Image (tube, grey):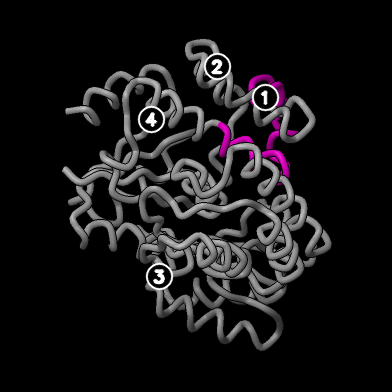
């Protein structure tokens, strides 16, 4: 059994996440306390108790989701998991790539929390509210979505943001262009084209100011080569060099999250089991839809921990 760890992205946050981990494991409590200290505020209180609209803010959701993921990792490690010897690869969806890199030792926990706070604020500030939009295109082939984005780009920026697999592709850009692309997609046979309730056009060229903010932030952070290779979002292939990873994280802000290709790469390179560590089961569901030969398992709370430890130590 060849194992990869995956880490969820924005949208998987929910009030109460991580609370049961904190109540049951000192290692998880230590993670949440370190993140709170790094950010200079009690983010854990927002995670555990809400309000939901505060947790959903990009600048909060990103470090919060990372904290829950790393809490799970630290609990597994306390129970004997050695990442380097038991896990072949790590990958994360958008902000989850930072969680993966923290788990693999490229960034410290405190630095990862601060990087994601910077990233969240920079992404929110890059585009005035109402200028950008994102839409999910359901049931249309990748090449057809590329074509409608190219046609819609005649009136404004429009591109694929996330290729999530299972017939779901998210597009991003200027509002009028995204709406135009959604209409074209429906005309060309998409089952649905749904405008998403997001606060900014993530993973589009409009995020260029945020990419520059991350270039500066990443340049000033201590980095180490990861203990295991990370499958980079923008390449869907393994990377092991810390400086190259940092450059790809800058590119990721305006580039496509190639999640379908990431799971396909896993399946084609001997990975049999994907453990999704952290809040929710989104990536586990996507894995099943992308390639049924890959087994997806979500580990988010105390009830999942013992079963995961038994399987990982077998």
- The residue positioned 35% from the left and 22% from the top of the image is 305
From the image, which quarter does the C terminus lie in? top left
Give yes or no for contact between labels 3 and 4 (Cβ–Cβ under 8 Å): no
Question: Which percent across, then down, holds residue 10?
Answer: 58, 46
Disc 1: CA contacts within 10 A as few (<14), some (14-19) or many (>=20) = many
Left or right: 244 as drawn, with respect to 82? right
- The residue positioned 54% from the left and 78% from the top of the image is 184
Q: Earlier in the sequence, mark 1 or mark 3?
A: 1
Give yes or no for contact between labels 1 and 2 (Cβ–Cβ under 8 Å): yes
> In this orientation, which residue lies closer to the viewer: 156 or 242?
242
Mark 1 = which residue? 44
Mark 3 = which residue? 140
CA gap, disc 4 and disc 1: 19 Å
> In this orientation, which residue lies closer to the viewer: 35 or 256?
35
- Which mark's residue is nearer the viewer, 4 or 2? 2
Give yes or no for contact between labels 1 and 3 (Cβ–Cβ under 8 Å): no
- Helix, strand or loop under label 1: helix
**Residue 110 highlighted magenta (yes or no):** no
Q: Earlier in the sequence, mark 3 or mark 2?
A: 2
Give yes or no for contact between labels 3 and 2 (Cβ–Cβ under 8 Å): no
**Residue 57 highlighted magenta (yes or no):** yes
Mark 2 = which residue? 22
CA gap, disc 1 and disc 2: 10 Å
Q: Is residue 138 visible?
A: no
- The residue positioned 67% from the left and 24% from the top of the image is 44
Mark 4 = which residue? 299
- Helix, strand or loop under label 4: strand
- Please identify the quarter of the rendering in which residue 230 is found: bottom left
- Helix, strand or loop under label 2: helix
């Amino acid at each position: 059994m060849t194992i990869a760890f995956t880490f969820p992205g924005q949208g998987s946050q929910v009030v109460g996440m991580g609370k049961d981990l904190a109540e049951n494991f000192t290692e998880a409590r230590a993670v949440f306390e370190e993140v709170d200290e790094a950010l200079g505020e009690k983010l854990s209180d927002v995670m555990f108790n809400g309000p939901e609209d505060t947790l959903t803010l990009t600048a909060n959701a990103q470090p919060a989701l990372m904290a829950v993921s790393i809490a799970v990792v630290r609990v597994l490690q306390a129970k004997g998991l050695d990442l380097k010897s038991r896990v072949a690869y790590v990958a994360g969806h958008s902000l989850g790539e930072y969680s993966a890199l923290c788990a693999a030792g490229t960034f410290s926990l405190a630095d990862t929390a601060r990087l994601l706070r910077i990233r969240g604020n920079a992404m929110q500030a890059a585009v005035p509210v109402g200028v950008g939009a994102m839409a999910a295109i359901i049931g249309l082939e990748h090449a057809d979505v590329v074509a409608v984005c190219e046609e819609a780009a005649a009136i404004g920026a429009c591109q694929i943001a996330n290729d999530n697999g299972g017939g779901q592709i998210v597009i991003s850009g200027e509002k009028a262009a995204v709406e135009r692309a959604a209409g074209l997609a429906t005309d060309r046979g998409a089952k649905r084209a749904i405008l998403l309730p997001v606060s900014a056009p993530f993973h589009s060229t409009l995020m260029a100011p945020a990419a520059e903010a991350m270039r500066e932030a990443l340049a000033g952070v201590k980095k180490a080569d990861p203990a295991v290779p990370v499958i980079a979002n923008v390449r869907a292939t393994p990377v092991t060099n810390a400086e190259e990873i940092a450059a790809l994280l800058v590119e990721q802000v305006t580039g496509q999250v190639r999640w379908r290709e990431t799971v396909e790469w896993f399946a084609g390179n001997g990975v049999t089991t994907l453990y999704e560590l952290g809040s929710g089961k989104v990536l586990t569901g996507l894995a099943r839809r992308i390639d049924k030969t890959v087994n997806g398992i979500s580990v988010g709370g105390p009830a999942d921990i013992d079963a995961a430890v038994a399987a990982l130590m077998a």
